[in-house]
Image (spheres, grey):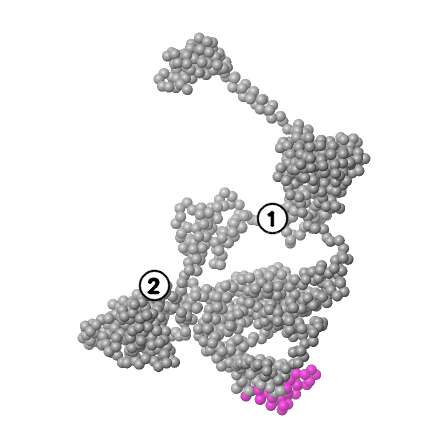
Amino acid sequence: MATGTIGSLATFDVKVQTWEEYTEILEQFFMANEIDDEGKQRAILISVVGAQTYERSYQQLVTMLKDHFNPQPSEIVQRFKFDLRTKKPTETMTEYVAELRCLAQDCNYGATLNQMLRDRLVCGIDDDRIQRRLLSETNLTFETALKIAVAAETTSKNVLDLKYKTSEQVCNSVTFHGKKFDQRQKSNTDEDKDIRECYRCGGRNHKANECRFKKDKCYGCGKIGHLAKACRNKGKQGGDAVFEKRGKGIRPHRAFRVSETTESEESDETFTLACVKTDELKKVKPFTVEFHADGKLVKFEIDTGSSVSLMTEEKSKVIWKDTVSPKVKTTKVKLKTYTGEPLEVVGVTDVQVKYQQQEKKMPLVVVKGSGPCLLGREWLEGLRLQWSEIKLIQSEEVTLTQVLFRHEEMFKEELGMLKGTIATLHVPKDASPRFFRPRSVPYALKPKKIISPVKYSEWAAPVVPIVKPDGSIRLCGDYKLTVNKVFFARLDGGKQFTKLDMSHAYQQIIMDEHSKKYLTVNTHKGLFTYNRLPFGVASAPAIFQRTMEGLLQGIPGVVYLDDILVTGGNRENHLKTLENVLMKLKEAGLRLKRGKCVFLADEVEYLGHRVDAQGLHPTGTKVKAIDDAPEPKNVTELKVYLGLLNYYNKFLPNLAMLLAPLHLLLRKDTQWTWKKSQQEAFKETVPQMGSPVMLQAYQYNIVYKPGKYHQNVDALSRLPVPGEGEVNAAQIRKWTLQDGTLSKVHEYVLQGWPVEVESLLLPYYHRRDALSVKNGCVTWRARIIIPLQGRATVLKQLHQTHSGMSRMKGLARSYMWWPCMDQDVEKVGQNCDVCQSLKKAPAQAPLHPWEWTSSPWERLHVDYAGPFLGKMFLILVDSHSKWMDVYPVIHATYTVTIEKLRSCFSTHGLPKMLVSDNATCFKSEEFETFMKRNGIQHVTSAPYHPSSNGLVERAVQTFKEGMKKMKDETVETRVARFLFTYRITPHATTGLSPAQMLMSRKLRSTFDLLLPDLKTRILNKQQKQKEGHDKSCKFRSFKTGDSVYVRNYSGGPKWIPAVVESCTGPLSYKTVLGQGQTEKACGSNNKSQFRGDAGR
């Protein structure tokens, strides 16, 4: 059987692949099909390249096309680009080095490549610390530099991850001075009056140049030399949180906070309360312990620097708000801050303190202000604490400053990039490209890589510059814009509101390559295409809204479009929600614009509305624009006015009836006539906008009503008729609500999909963009999704007529869908006895090759070929070595088969297994007996499946092809020539010849005559070496009794006399020294005197 061409060649296209890649594919095609003739190679190349290259050879064509399509880049330009490349801020060290290697490919640095990479790495990184570390190294290599840089980068990242940011830590201590100190203070009162107030700290007991805070930094204005409380600029700032720039990002100010202390009742001593904030303590969490004070569980912060325990008046009211609070008595206790400022003490109360098994009456000082309850030394002395049980825990108080500080990365002045999402635009196939003339406008999007220049495009929109409220320019394409409605129901119960402004919101989403051509803009500087999702695209709001829904799904109190609105029922929930939103945005790679964000505001403007705790209101500017609108003079002005009103139609009841006279003027073929009815309708809308209705979220309560109180029950639903009818939409809707999986899909389609879903929902999640809900049924495009409960019924209806598999699938795909629907349809047909009995033969099973044997002659494959050339040929193939034996016979009988196999086995031995087909000669009883006696396992292939014995079948095909090509010789000669050539030729599977695999040696052939004889070469070389050496040498021999000198290596004279005793070799003799010692020595042809070697 003749074999066909292996593989196929596609026409060369420079847009699809480079010429070098195409020539490699071409050469592999020639090798696979054994095409060695250059004329044939040229013909194939011309057929896939073109007819203009007819007169060139194949190699010439390849070289010319390579030079044309891949010209050598300029070495100077490539080195210039390499020298300018620096590490980008968002680029990791490994990515930067990979880019350097790519740039260096065409620089031809040769042996200096690693040095150039090292220099560019050190000079191009943007981290001073790593750069100083690398420059301090001696004999720095590229590999060492890369290892150090990567390690430093990884360490910096890990340190940032482990860095613990806590709230402001305050070290509170109370110092007891006693009465003497108090008297000393009183005695100096008159002197202190003459000292002016220190402008650095506000104190009066020292001069400004002696103030210990003269080198401290003010957290109000950022200047050095005074404290925040004495800052003269502190009134110029306000708000919940004050921020300053420090290096990268934003960090909050730290300010001194006055904490509280306590002391004994009726004491007249003065205490100094120290509030010291140090950077060293900012990572130390407070030690806290809980006591039962008058039956209430109160958490105290342990403060060994305070001699008394205290609580703020505000906190005491909260703790005992529902019970009788302890009586507070007046006290002479005086408390001062570290800087000498007095604290307002309300009084002291005695509380019954219980801690584990201890219970005592302890004094507790109550002060004005706010802060934690402090546990002083007085209580610590009176109560024995279990220190092993006191755990170090973080302060539970969460402030806006802390939240923003933890997520300061979100406010970097850089363009964010949404991870894992690429925007795609779907354009109808019959849409016609449109190309508009350019508009000359300024733009600055090219350096940010938002747009890229292109040479040609069928699609081009004019640019539209939009001036934003902050004065910057937003460059848009003049595409069609759709308006999306935003629902405010999620803001129900909100007290305060935070508005997060996305920095260049849409442009943080990457566009896919296919959609970029639709976003080409025509400017006075040429055509540019957007790399990011631009503003003004019709589907941009939907794309962005869908992305944000998936990102922020499941977070309560959040509304999102261009801006994100966050709220909560109280401040704690609000900050918790804000933390979750910022975390999600940071993980997604998005960025916010700090200057346009509003935090914890009582009211905000959002999408043209004013939102506060009371509800939804129209904004004052919009109301004023409607109030001041002039009377319309034509249809165009009327449409503008009605557009303003319709935006706030939800605030104006019965607006359609009120504006009916105005809408009459908009009818087709109606002449413009401004009558009294129109004038009255116009005037009535103005006072309504002056006091619009406020919209509040509907508050409802779900109340359970027992069934016995239902008077209008449905008898038919409670008395169903047994039987199974046809499935309809109502039944599908009922099953959908009862189905555990599909009911979740129903909910997610209506409310938005989360970012991650369980595995059962993945088929629906991947199709979420095409899912919708119609009359309570979930549909995918135009196909209804069948719940699990109804699939068996639907499948039964599909198979009523026993249609074929393809028809059943086609019918099902026209009306319905569910996961694995095609497999379920196939199972119905496979389990149908009627269909299976009338089914055609199945398709071929996958190929299962024989296992390759580990040693020669373990498994033989045997078969007969013929009748061919008037004979039958018994063919044997070894599965390991692919060795082939062929025996021509007249008749294929079991006797002849056994005889030929016995002859083969006498040469190579008995195999372990023999594989054959089910021919009579192999299935006979005599043949089976022959196999068993010789211990050979006989395996037969499946009937009518010759491919199961494919090794010998292929050998039969190869043998027939080889025999047909040889002519004018006897059959025996042809067989011998074929087998010899086959056995010495490397096999395509093993890579070695069958002779090498079986005999571990190459068989000598006439081709060995082409190689010189190795032994002859060696003998000739040795002879030439001897002749060259003997030209300057003279052969001498000695007889027994000759006197000679022997070389002495044992010390003393260099040569010593000796006498030859006997000859032991051609040039060696046995000598006797003067002392009678016998030594073996080597003769020398030096002069006439023999000198041997001694002392060995």
Q: Which mark is residue 951?
A: none
Using the rendered image of the protein, determine whether residue 986 is visible from the camera's viewpoint. Answer: no
Residue numbers of the magenta segment? 660-687
Q: Which mark is residue 388?
A: 2
Residue 757 vertical position relative to residue 143 in the rendered view, above or below: below
| Mark 1–mark 2 distance (CA, rounded to whole Å) | 77 Å
Side (left or right) of 949 relative to 544: right
Check disc 1 and report its element: helix, strand or loop. loop
Residue drawn 55% across the image and 65% down it: 755
Count of numbered badges drawn on the protein = 2
The image quarter containing residue 704 is bottom right
Kindly report which numbered mark, 1 or 2, lies closer to the viewer in this rendering.
Answer: 2
Q: Which mark is residue 71?
A: 1
Quadrant where the C terminus is found in the figure: top left
Residue at the right extreme? 870
Residue drawn 43% across the image and 60% down it: 161
Nearer to me, 467 or 189: 189
Q: Is 661 within the magenta?
A: yes
Nearer to me, 729 or 539: 729
Residue at the top extreme? 1041
Residue drawn 71% across the image and 42% down it: 940
The type of residue carrying mark 1 is Pro
Side (left or right) of 399 relative to 954: left
The type of residue carrying mark 2 is Ser
Residue drawn 44% across the image and 73% down it: 572
Q: Is 793 within the magenta?
A: no
Main SS, magenta residues: helix
